Amino acid sequence: MTSTYLLYRTYAANLPQTLSRIGAQTDVANAATYYQNNIGNVTSVDDFLNNTRLFSYAMSAYGLSDMAYAKAFMKKVLTSDLTDKHSFVNKLTDPRFLAFAKAFQFSTDGTVAPQDVVPQTQTEEDDTIGLYSQTQVNKGAAASTEATYYQSQIGNITSVDQLMSNARLLKYVVTAYGLNPDRVSNATIRAVLTSDLSDPNSTANTLNNSAYQSLAAAFNFNTDGTVNGTAQSSANISKTVYQYYNATGTSATPAAAAYKTQYYKAAISSITSVDDLLNNNALRDVALTAFGLNPLLQSNTALRQILTSDLSDPNSVANQQTNAAYKKLAAAFNFNADGSVNGSAQTADQTNSVIGLYSNTYDDALQAANDRATTSYKSALAGVKTVDDLLKSTAYNFIMNAYGFDSSTMTKYTLKKILESDPNDPNSFARQSHNAAYIKLASDFNFDADGNSKTAPTAQTQNNIISTGALYTTHNGGVVADGATATLQQTTAQTETTYYATKMASITNVDDFLKDNRLVKYALDAYGLKTANLSTSDLRKILTSDPLDPKSFINQPENAAYRDLAVAYNFGTDGKTLSVPKQQVQDRSQRVATADGYLEQTMETQAGDQSDGLRLALYFLNKAPNITSPYQLLADKALLQFTQTALGLSTAMSQADIDTQAKMITKKLNLADLQDPTKLNKLITQFSAMYDINNSNVASTSPVVQILQGSSTSFNGIIDIGAITTPIASF
């Protein structure tokens, strides 16, 4: 009979190839294919239990085939609250049940909780908000360029026809007065500009829009199109520029602020009454903003009372205000009680003070405006589940601004088609448009082709982030107990774990991950590849392998050492992060673990047909990396049998107190050695030989048996059988 030792050495030397061969067996491959194709359809624990093929496959994967009949029992296992130490599964001593429960995502009511769907991930949301802020700055700069051009050219206009022939100037004027240059005909604009406002029947007066009257009043054109003096007064030029900033939504930009301060300094000397100030929106806005007052929330009636207050009178309106800003505002001007000026509206010092205050508070006001817009956007986005929801919400205007779209040319229908586009599909509407802004918009939102929000793509599930962190911590000093002093190694590990967990949330593709050396180093350390000397190209090949594809890179026998790393991440073959299914009873890593478990169990079963000892050896090899306590060995009958045999412990030890049994094991076995492949192999090799001795399975001429049988000393440690140099063929 072939020795267990020889069989184990044969299996151990070719383990990846053996698993690959078993996976290719027709019945095994068919079972795996069925499981992967159908497990995603499970929405409740009853669905799972009632599908015999799925249930049997999973039970076999976790070594529970002998319990497949006990569906009521397993239902209680699967619906246990894993966070409750008193739950059903946490009271069971056999660790297989807990491992089985952790492999699935059933709620305590037996359902599979749907994953959250989001119109944008946090990263995408931040990107859109950043675009909004930058677009506002860019629009302000563009508005400033147009203002400079307008101010330099409008003085040269000597007829309405000359203005009409300059498309750039005409567009500026029409936009400034709140009209859409794409929808108002040039003929109408000409008629308005040459209207006699004293004639109620003139074009400007008969059109049902006061904007036309304001436009006509801003210019000095005669009814025949000629000009009396200049086309615009300096005051109307300034008014036009100011209104253009407002009309284009750029009034809160740095460019607009620069113009307002310049205008304020030049125009304040012309103010002869409080009403002059209050009726000049540009001056009014600067003055109020300077003192931290929102111009939109102030009434001119109240402001007139403030500005004409006698500050020496404690009962004056300004002095009675709880907000000291009103008193400071009144002190900044020289208005009499009747609204007239006392000398001038402001002294030079007062003007400079207001401009200085405005400059200091402007940034705060701008930030406050951005914060309000951002807060409103986030609030609106929280209620969005579909594209239609988005287009009906206040978020619509924010998006239009952020991506530089004009509502006069961009229809909601087109916007919807963009948002429903797959940016990765070259045939999608966004990609076919060859418009970079369209593609960017589609990429920054998370809608499917039907306009419904999808689950967010993620580089790692939360479960895998936690698992990776646990592995890293184990390799770097362990967890610090309450009240204990952390070592430098432990403190560093905690710092790196915090960085890793935070940073992973923003990773959108494998290249971003590979560019961050701290993330890569952390991952390699966690998955035991610290010394593997893998290049960036190697890592990319590993991380973009599909673990469910038997032909992928990591599923080749020679690359088996990299599978745990690949499975822990959620990158597609194109390197981009994958979306999590809306409802999944298992994530990708859990599905892969189940498939691996099924292969291992099948291998152990087939090995058991040759030797029960071989089955035990392979079972221990599979479980050893996760063994950290002697109580795990004591709780599993197969592991305990292995341990007793390998360490030469009598089965009678089971009669002793559980803590005594644990001490007996740790006295002879350093559990940390199980994480060392070389030491683990020596232990299993030793078990194989001891098993053969105990069961008389090999000839007495076996060198291993002779060594062990010939020893007259008591067994109190691991014999280095691996050092035996006799060729295996002679055993």
Image (cartoon, rainbow, N blue to C red):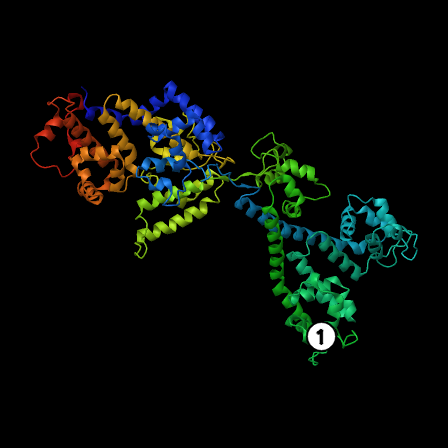
- Estimate the x, y position of residue 511 in percent, counting from the top left: 46, 39
- Estimate the x, y position of residue 434 in percent, counting from the top left: 63, 34
Residue 32 occupies which quadrant of the picture?
top left
Q: Secondary structure at mark 1?
A: helix
- For the N terminus, the image quarter is top left
User: In the rendered view, does 334 fall on the left or right side of 197?
Assistant: left
* Residue 383 in view in this figure: yes
Name the residue nearer the viewer: 556 or 157: 556
The residue lying furthest to the left in this view is 712
Find disc 1 in the rendering and name its residue.
Answer: 317
- For the C terminus, the image quarter is top left
Picture layout, residue 724 above or below residue 503: above
Number of marks in picture: 1
Name the residue nearer the viewer: 84 or 203: 84
Name the residue nearer the viewer: 380 or 215: 380
The residue lying furthest to the bottom in this view is 312
